[in-house]
């Protein structure tokens, strides 16, 4: 199978109906970057910047951060890399950060909430990203945005830093995209103005699913209790995609579920045209997508939804089995 996937490396993930799905990879360490060439990923759809912070004994200085971002872009083969700003708190605790005792850390002081309250850390990271890009294209994405004004504030901070860099005579990115992760259900219902302003969205399914079902992703008792292909959840994903399409807001999905073949197929059938996953999943998912007609899959999904099924999984898996896929 490995050889089969290698043969597909330079081919698009084009389904039989003609639709093409962009497959990108998730990364978090410099060591992940060689997979960009090896897997045939079209770019890095999610670069988790907190990894550098998690492996240190103290906050990396601006020059260190900038050096890492620069090296990542150097090894990025000119492909798009989406840098997610620090996602600290909840499941990702910095060893040198004073632990705040929170009864519900997943619902607590984390990610952009922490960044907006500790503006200095966020500003330093944004400066590092701008310096690291050194005139190249830059895509920045904020995690755990729950309402419009959080994004506006974070975006203003980035634009202010761009101005500052320019006034200091530094080069600024030739192209700058400022996006957000959609990982709280509330953001799906943000005003139209949000969808107009945000340059792109990436659905963080790991968090979105835990909030959607109120089931802690860290709790073994409940984490697998609700199927990703549950009709309610899949319908919600489809509504997000439709809303983005209406506003021409580019949308992708970067949670771990995008790296599971049947899930990826269903997401594509619901309209997602960009999925970010661990590099090892790219071959198998491309292989599967190339054998399927997404509109046929959509018909199967719609029929399963209409039948009152709880999950579309049995129907989609049955359809695949019938076809010998
Ligand atoms: C997610 O929540 O789906 C996501 C991609 O981010 P993380 O797993 O780092 O929280
Ligand atoms: Mg998340």
Image (spheres, rainbow, N blue to C red):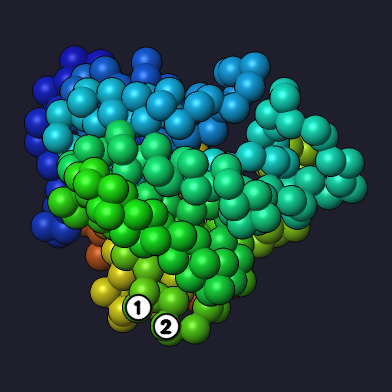
Q: Quadrant of residue 184?
A: bottom right
Location of residue 311 in the rendering, given as x and y in whole percent from the top left corner: 57, 58
Dots 2 and 1: beta carbons under 8 Å?
yes
Most foreground residue, 210 or 201? 201
In this view, 226 is above or below 190: above
Q: Please rate how many residues cluster around mark 1, counting C-alpha atoms within 10 Å: few if below 14, some from 14 to 19, many from 20.
A: some
Q: Quadrant of residue 213?
A: bottom right
Q: For this view, does 307 lie left or right of residue 81?
A: right
Residue at point 37%, 20% (across, down):
30
Residue designated by label 1: 196
Q: How many marks?
A: 2
Secondary structure under the numbered disc 2 in the rendered image? helix
Residue at point 39%, 37% (across, down):
128
Residue designated by label 2: 193
Most foreground residue, 92 or 302? 92
Q: For this view, does 153 lie left or right of residue 161?
A: right
Q: Please rate how many residues cluster around mark 2, counting C-alpha atoms within 10 Å: few if below 14, some from 14 to 19, many from 20.
A: few
Q: For this view, does 263 lie left or right of residue 103?
A: left
């Amino acid at each position: 199978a490995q050889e089969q996937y290698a043969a597909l490396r330079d081919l698009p993930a084009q389904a039989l109906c003609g639709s093409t799905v962009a497959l990108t990879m998730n990364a978090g360490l410099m060591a992940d970057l060689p997979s960009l060439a090896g897997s045939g990923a079209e770019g890095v759809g999610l670069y988790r910047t907190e990894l550098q912070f998690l492996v240190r004994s103290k906050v990396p200085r601006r020059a260190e951060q900038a050096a890492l971002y620069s090296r990542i872009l150097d090894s990025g083969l000119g492909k798009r890399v989406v840098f997610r700003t620090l996602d600290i708190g909840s499941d990702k605790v910095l060893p040198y950060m004073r632990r705040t005792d929170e009864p519900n850390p997943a619902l607590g002081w984390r990610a952009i909430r922490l960044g907006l309250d500790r503006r200095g850390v966020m500003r330093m990271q944004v400066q590092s990203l701008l310096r690291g890009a050194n005139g190249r294209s830059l895509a920045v994405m904020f995690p755990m945005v729950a309402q419009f004004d959080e994004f506006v504030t974070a975006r203003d901070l980035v634009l202010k830093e761009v101005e500052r860099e320019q006034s200091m005579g530094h080069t600024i990115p030739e192209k700058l995209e400022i996006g957000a992760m959609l990982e709280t259900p509330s953001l799906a219902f943000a005003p139209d103005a949000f969808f107009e302003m945000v340059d792109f969205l990436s659905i963080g399914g790991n968090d979105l699913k835990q909030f959607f079902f109120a089931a802690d992703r860290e709790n073994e008792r409940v984490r697998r209790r609700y199927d990703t292909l549950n009709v309610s959840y899949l319908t919600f994903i489809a509504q997000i995609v439709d809303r983005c399409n209406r506003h021409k807001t580019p949308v992708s999905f970067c949670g771990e579920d995008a790296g599971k073949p049947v899930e990826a197929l269903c997401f594509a059938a619901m309209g997602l045209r960009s999925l970010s996953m661990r590099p090892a999943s790219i071959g198998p998912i491309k292989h599967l997508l190339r054998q399927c007609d997404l509109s046929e899959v959509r018909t199967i999904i719609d029929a399963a939804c209409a039948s009152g099924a709880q999950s579309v999984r049995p129907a989609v898996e049955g359809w695949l089995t019938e076809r010998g896929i």
